[in-house]
Amino acid sequence: MHTGSSENVTVENYPELSVMTFREYMQRAARTLPDDLGSRDLLADAALGLCGEAEEIDTASSTDARDDEIGDGWWYVAAICHALAIEPESIPPHASPADAEIGLFRSACRIAERAKKVRYHREAIDRHRDAILEQLGHYASSLSERTPTSKSAIWSANLEKLASRYPDGFEPARD
């Protein structure tokens, strides 16, 4: 976007730039997915990530730290969509639970239980897809409930962090 001046084009100067869909976020975040994992391993890793982020969101020391962890939670939601080879529109919308914190933990644990059956018991992903999607909808609703910050702003900030951390895509040696 050319503004005709030397003014920096930033989200602060042009709020319309911050509007992002989950599909766009998911596509842009995919560059940081490990490329050496199959769908079973990616599902298991992402399910564990959901659990870890639920705890980090719960114990965040500030609003900024909480929103940063919520962005990481969305990354794991996107990773599960990739593992299941589903479109983001497949995640069913859910009303936020009365207690978003409990909903976050409960959904993460239920997804992890299904991922364990796929990864370690070698059950078919398709057998658990609907249950995982159901809980993913609850998790996503709980993420949204935990902050007044827009999802688009959270996703944008997360992508900036990922670009800084992994400028050339995911590199396991960096972690």
Image: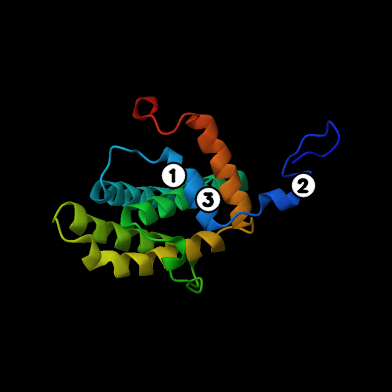
Mark nearer the N terminus (1 vs 3): 3
For the question of whether residue 62 can be seen, the reply is no
For the question of whether residue 31 can be seen, the reply is yes
Disc 1: which residue: 30
**Residue at mark 3 to residue at mark 2: CA–CA distance:** 19 Å
User: What is the crowding at mark 3: few (fewer than 14 residues within 10 Å), some, or many (at least 20)?
Assistant: some
Q: Is residue 4 above or below residue 105?
A: above
Please, what is the three-letter code of the amino acid marked with disc 3?
Tyr
Q: Is residue 161 above or below residue 89?
A: above
User: Which residue is at the far top?
Assistant: 173
Please, what is the three-letter code of the amino acid marked with disc 1?
Ala
| Left or right: 161 in relation to 124 | right
Regarding mark 1 in the picture, which secondary structure is present there? helix
Disc 3: which residue: 25
Disc 2: which residue: 14
Q: Is residue 121 above or below residue 102?
A: above
Q: Position of residue 151 (x, y in %)?
A: 59, 56
Q: Residue at x 55, y 42 (%)?
A: 159
Q: Label 3 near label 1: C-beta < 8 Å?
A: no
Please, what is the three-letter code of the amino acid marked with disc 2?
Tyr
Q: Position of residue 135 (x, y in %)?
A: 37, 66
Q: Label 2 near label 3: C-beta < 8 Å?
A: no
Q: Residue at x 30, y 52 (%)?
A: 43
Viewport quadrant of the C terminus: top left
Q: Quadrant of residue 125?
A: bottom left
